[in-house]
Amino acid sequence: MMSKLYFRYGTVGSAKTLNLLAVAHNYRQQRKNVLLIKPEIDTRFGVDTIKTRAGLSALADVLAPPSGPLVLPSLKNVVCVLVDEVQFLTESQITQLHETAHAMPPESAVPVICYGLRTDFKQNLFPSISRLMALADSIEEIKNVCYFCLQKSAFNLRIQNGRPVFEGPVVDLGCEDKYLPICADCYNIKRRTKEFSARNLNAVNFSHTKEEPMSCCKNTNSKCKATEGSRPSLQINSVVDDISFHIYGSAFVFNFGPNSSYELTVPLTEKTDKLKLASQLMSAASFLTNAARKENA
């Protein structure tokens, strides 16, 4: 049977390493030899330790250096090569693994199964993954669930001080304290919320006392509860479609455009962090906007 180069990818927390150790265990139970490879830069659980979040672990046989070729032992009695965190290997090392799986003569070839992330937290392919997807004979997804909803996760969200971040170095090793699995919809909402906060943080004026009503309130078709002569303490125009946020007295009013009957009023207290509330509610803006669109369709 022809050996192949396999790529099994999944988001953070999708049990990729657990899968790898299970495959290794099954081979060893049958008294067959496997070769375990991990990147040298991954020292989260020790220099040569491959460990799952569930606590299972094994020692790596080969450490992939940050540069240069893989130094592989004789594979004469090895039936399978297993690679953990393959996204941290180099493109030339991926080519080397492909050559291992397709060595000549065919009886000297050894199957190679690689486990790792497909994209970084910026939704970009890792350079090694781009090469691996070009060369792999088989590509399989290890499915996981979004941390924020029940959809299938597709990307990895980086967390810093409890908040999503979308800039910074690509390699920043961490576990659940730094990365969360996230679906495409939730990722886009989080990114829009981040843009919203960055664009409006310095523009928000909590002491606004303009006598003139806001522009949307002048529209006779608007469902906004503000009336002529009202004195809003805050207005934020979101970066998502036509949604606008107003604070009038003790209520946070959402208006979804002049032709929509969707409006949400949130009572406020003196302890309410208005900007934080706006950011949190922006996370639901996509869903509410889609609802408004369906109504107007």
Image: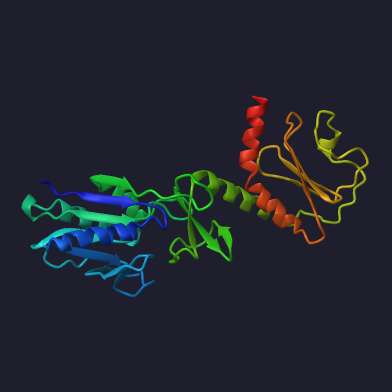
Q: Residue at x 52, y 61 (%)?
A: 168
> Would residue 106 appear left or right of 277 to someone viewing this image?
left
In this view of the protein, can residue 100 be seen by the observer? yes
Q: Residue at x 17, y 60 (%)?
A: 27
Picture quarter containing residue 272?
bottom right
Q: Position of residue 20 (x, y in %)?
A: 27, 59
In the image, farthest residue toward the top: 297
Q: Position of residue 291 (x, y in %)?
A: 64, 34
> Would residue 115 appear left or right of 243 to someone viewing this image?
left
> Would residue 95 appear left or right of 210 to someone viewing this image?
left
In the image, farthest residue toward the bottom: 46
How many numbered circles are shown?
Answer: 0
Q: Position of residue 45 (x, y in %)?
A: 36, 73
Picture quarter containing residue 220?
top right
> Would residue 183 appear left or right of 104 to someone viewing this image?
right
Identify the colour scheme used: rainbow
Front residue (pair 94, 76)? 76
Picture quarter containing residue 48?
bottom left
Residue 179 to residue 195: above or below: below
Q: Quadrant of the C terminus?
A: top right
Q: Residue at x 25, y 65 (%)?
A: 37
In the image, farthest residue toward the front: 29
Q: Residue at x 20, y 53 (%)?
A: 98
Front residue (pair 292, 103)? 292
Front residue (pair 102, 291)? 291
Q: Position of residue 191 (x, y in %)?
A: 58, 50
Front residue (pair 248, 269)? 269
In this view of the protein, can residue 93 be seen by the observer? no
